[in-house]
Image (spheres, rainbow, N blue to C red):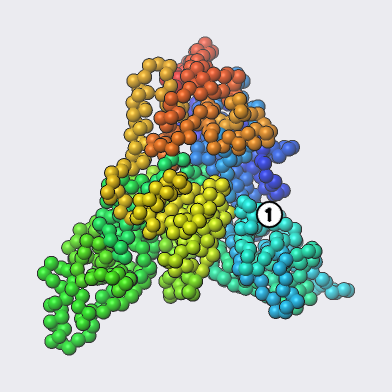
């Protein structure tokens, strides 16, 4: 569809009227972007800014000539790095329905060519459900900054200052604006005379940063919101606070951390985190706490994270498609762990994380395949689980013994004997080896001495990292991530992003420094976004900050937070967000992730985190050694109804088929039935095109008001508008033929919804009837426009030419119905 006006195409006036249920700051505005140049063609920087009206309404009008217009609303504000520079649009909230709103002007417009004149949308509500999330960093100047205060963050030097009811507040300021740096309660010396250099500078026209929001794990639900004037109650070694702000001038960004007494609104002390304190993009630091007289009384410890936009080549991000929070209900997905399973410390039929292992899992009917990704020294994303490998290095021996050893060290069939008198282990980090060298060296697993079995020859369990020199390419380790996209069938990927963390034993998973986090994530994201095409992708990571970055830098694919929970099998991480399954749920909800990937070991002790996740609208995946037993698999599938299970040796001992393959076959069958059905019988749902999405309990369109919103929320789990026609019939059955997880280029259909003929109402119309009657009515409307157009032909040749074009367009629309 062309974004411009086609000669002879009728023009329509489209109205936008939306109310926002949450409070907006004075510098925040509502925008609409969509599939037309007047709405920016999905580029947020060119979106239409709506005008504010009373009662929280925002309105706008565009004149255009299109058959279908898709659009979304979002909330934004402007920041400016310095005077004279162009303002930068920051996105605060945006609608994240998997399918945008939609209007069909040729069908919905009045006789005067006006459509949506009496419709009022509610921001984020679509088809009875609320779908909106936080924005993401888009422009090169924009940065998101997170400060985390947790554990024993407050340290005081004297006993009299130690109390349990302090309150914390974090205030950002620009170093160039001196009047922002001080607290209003700071005492000033009486009769002091300020010098020119000490005079406060004037406020800029626009700020360079946003106000700071807070998310507390003690809140229910835990989500980012504005801070209270005198801070939030903080209890040492109990509370977990996350503070968030946006900035387009991070080189000048500083923070003032204010500590108030718990019972009175009195400032006790404050500390300053200057750019020199936050010298890296990630770290932990502390700043002194000073009284108003400048006397140090303690310290406050906190972690910080700077997230910059994705700066490597990738498809231009837009608001057209979003699956970051979209997950369709269906039976539990079964995911092949590292393909066919862990082969280095357990037994598997194929070497883990190889093309052969992943292909085998696909052939065995895995719904998705899971694998691990990190970087080589030359910054190539590879598929491999561990951060280290063991290299066999030849010992220095006398020349005669050396010749004999060289003869014995490799057999005629290319298999190494690894005589301990000749060879020795040497551990190397994967990040210190280029991909070419990784593929040339003879390597073993980092836990080769812990495996408890003889690794001198290749076994059926494939415990050796590298095999014989003539091994087929698909069996070799260290495939590049791009190879997986090019070589594997169109099955979904669960990509676990591996980043080394500090453990509770104070050991880092990979000592000696690692890639800067933004660069690391950018390389992997650029690779995925450039190669994934229409493939289903789900990211996951044990590193909470990596999950945050994956979510903030892109909004196309969902992100799961991997957690260990209460585990005795694995060394725990120092980050408390992954040590507790309930903390993982709170973190995932606050950041806006799609869900949590739980450890089966922990859930078998206490399954309540899954219930909390469902309550907060999150999905649950489960991984763990316990899933080797069928009874545990059945428990998580049938009793807890989790959305995904990740386990080894998928499809062994049972015959299964990929759920998406089944769904596709079912859809093909339904469309085949449609072609052979008699005229007037509805066999499939109409094309997905949302118009107003608002229905009350009588299935009528709701014009405005919060009552309609409450009704929609109450019905959210049962009803969904699937087209320009609002239907109240949808099966809650959990069948293999349910809708695809990501409806990329697909029409939403299921066998259960085919069997009913729901009563619907055409939006912007008084017509009410069944689906079949409605489609007949719509076709009548279109055909009548064809006739009307034919009777209004002008006398000149140009007029007749334009009329023919209009008639052809309406005829085409009628035939498509």
User: Which residue is identified by label 1?
Assistant: 226
**Quarter of the image where one finds residue 132:** top right
SS class of the residue under badge 1? strand
Q: Residue furthest left?
A: 412
- Which residue is rendered at x = 16% and y = 76% of the image? 409
**Whole-percent x and y of residue 117?**
64, 27
**Whole-percent x and y of residue 12?**
58, 26
- Viewer-proximal residue among 384 and 459: 459
Q: Residues within 10 Å of mark 1 (few under 14, many from 20)?
A: few
Q: How many marks?
A: 1
**Whole-percent x and y of residue 489?**
30, 46
**Whole-percent x and y of residue 215?**
63, 57
Q: Is residue 451 above or below residue 338?
A: below
Q: Is residue 294 above or below residue 385?
A: below
- Which residue is rendered at x = 69% and y = 71% of the image? 271
- Viewer-proximal residue among 627 and 428: 627
- Which residue is rendered at x = 68% and y = 35% of the image? 706
- Which residue is rendered at x = 30% and y = 69% of the image? 451
Q: Residue furthest right?
A: 191
- Viewer-proximal residue among 388 and 80: 388
Residue 54 at least partly seen: yes
Q: Is residue 57 above or below residue 521?
A: above
Q: Looking at the rendering, in which quadrant would you find the C terminus?
A: top left
């Amino acid at each position: 569809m062309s974004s411009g006006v086609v000669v002879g195409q009728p023009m329509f006036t489209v109205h936008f009227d939306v109310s926002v249920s949450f409070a907006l700051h004075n510098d925040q505005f509502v925008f609409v972007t969509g599939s037309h140049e007047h709405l920016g063609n999905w580029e947020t920087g060119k979106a239409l800014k709506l005008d504010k009206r009373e009662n929280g309404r925002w309105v706008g009008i565009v004149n255009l000539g299109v058959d279908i217009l898709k659009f979304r609303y979002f909330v934004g504000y402007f920041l400016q790095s310095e005077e004279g520079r162009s303002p930068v649009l920051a996105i605060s909230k945006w609608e994240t329905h998997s399918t945008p709103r939609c209007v069909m002007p040729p069908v919905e417009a009045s006789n005067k060519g006006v459509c949506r004149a009496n419709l009022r949308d509610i921001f984020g509500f679509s088809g009875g459900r609320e779908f909106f999330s936080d924005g993401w960093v888009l422009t090169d100047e924009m940065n998101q900054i997170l400060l985390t205060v947790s554990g024993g963050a407050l340290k005081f030097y004297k006993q009299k200052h130690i109390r349990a009811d302090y309150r914390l507040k974090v205030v950002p300021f620009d170093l160039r604006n001196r009047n922002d740096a001080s607290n209003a309660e700071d005492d000033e010396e009486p009769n002091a005379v300020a010098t020119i250099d000490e005079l406060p500078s004037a406020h800029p026209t626009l700020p360079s940063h946003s106000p700071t929001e807070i998310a507390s794990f003690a809140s229910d639900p835990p989500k980012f919101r504005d801070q209270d004037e005198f801070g939030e109650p903080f209890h040492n070694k109990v509370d977990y606070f996350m503070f968030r702000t946006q900035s387009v001038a991070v080189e000048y960004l500083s923070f003032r951390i204010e500590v108030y007494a718990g019972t009175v609104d009195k400032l006790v002390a404050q500390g300053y985190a200057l750019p020199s304190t936050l010298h890296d993009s990630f770290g932990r630091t502390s700043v002194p706490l000073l009284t108003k007289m400048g006397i140090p009384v303690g310290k406050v410890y906190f972690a910080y994270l700077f997230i910059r936009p994705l700066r490597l080549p990738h498809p231009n991000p837009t608001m057209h498609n979003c699956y970051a929070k979209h997950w369709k209900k269906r039976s539990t997905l079964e995911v092949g762990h590292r393909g066919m399973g862990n082969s280095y410390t357990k037994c598997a039929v194929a070497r883990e994380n190889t093309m052969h292992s992943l292909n085998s899992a696909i052939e065995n009917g895995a719904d998705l395949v899971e694998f691990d990704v990190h970087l080589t020294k030359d910054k190539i994303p590879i598929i491999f689980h561990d951060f280290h490998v063991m290299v066999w290095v030849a010992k220095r021996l006398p020349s005669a013994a050396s010749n004999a050893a060289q003869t014995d060290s490799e057999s005629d069939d290319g298999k190494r004997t690894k005589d301990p008198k000749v060879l020795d282990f040497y551990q190397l980090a994967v990040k210190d080896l280029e991909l070419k060298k990784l593929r040339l060296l003879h390597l073993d697993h980092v836990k080769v001495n812990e495996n408890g079995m003889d690794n001198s020859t290749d076994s059926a369990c494939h415990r050796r990292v590298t095999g014989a020199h003539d091994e087929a390419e698909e069996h070799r380790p260290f495939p590049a991530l791009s190879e997986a996209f090019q070589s594997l069938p169109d099955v979904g990927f669960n990509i676990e992003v591996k980043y080394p963390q500090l453990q509770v034993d104070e050991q880092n998973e990979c000592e000696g420094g690692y890639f800067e986090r933004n660069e690391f994530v950018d390389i992997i994201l650029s690779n995925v976004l450039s190669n994934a095409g229409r493939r289903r992708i789900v990211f996951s990571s044990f590193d909470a900050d990596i999950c945050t970055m994956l979510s903030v830098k892109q909004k196309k694919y969902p992100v799961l937070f991997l957690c260990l929970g209460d585990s005795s099998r694995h060394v725990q991480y120092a980050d408390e967000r992954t040590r507790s399954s309930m903390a993982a749920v709170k973190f995932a909800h606050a950041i806006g992730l799609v869900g949590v990937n739980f450890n089966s070991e922990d859930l078998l002790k206490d399954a309540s985190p899954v219930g909390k996740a469902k309550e907060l609208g999150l999905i649950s995946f489960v991984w763990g050694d316990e899933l080797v037993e069928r009874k545990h698999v059945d428990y998580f599938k049938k009793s807890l109804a989790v959305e995904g299970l990740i386990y080894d040796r998928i499809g062994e001992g049972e015959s299964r088929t990929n759920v998406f393959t089944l769904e596709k076959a079912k859809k093909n069958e339904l469309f085949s039935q449609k072609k052979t059905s008699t005229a007037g019988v509805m066999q499939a749902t109409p094309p997905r095109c949302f118009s107003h999405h608002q229905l009350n309990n009588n299935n009528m369109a709701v014009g405005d008001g919060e009552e309609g919103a409450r009704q929609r929320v109450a019905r959210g789990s049962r009803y969904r508008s699937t087209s320009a026609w609002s239907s109240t019939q949808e099966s809650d059955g959990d069948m293999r033929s349910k809708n695809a997880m990501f409806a990329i280029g697909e029409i939403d259909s299921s066998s259960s919804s085919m069997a009913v003929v729901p009563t619907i109402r055409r939006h912007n119309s008084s017509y009410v009837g069944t689906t079949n009657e409605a489609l007949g009515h719509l076709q009548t409307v279109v055909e009548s426009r064809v006739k009307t157009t034919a009777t209004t032909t002008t006398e000149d040749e140009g007029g007749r030419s334009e009329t023919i074009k209009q008639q052809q367009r309406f005829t085409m629309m009628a035939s498509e119905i």
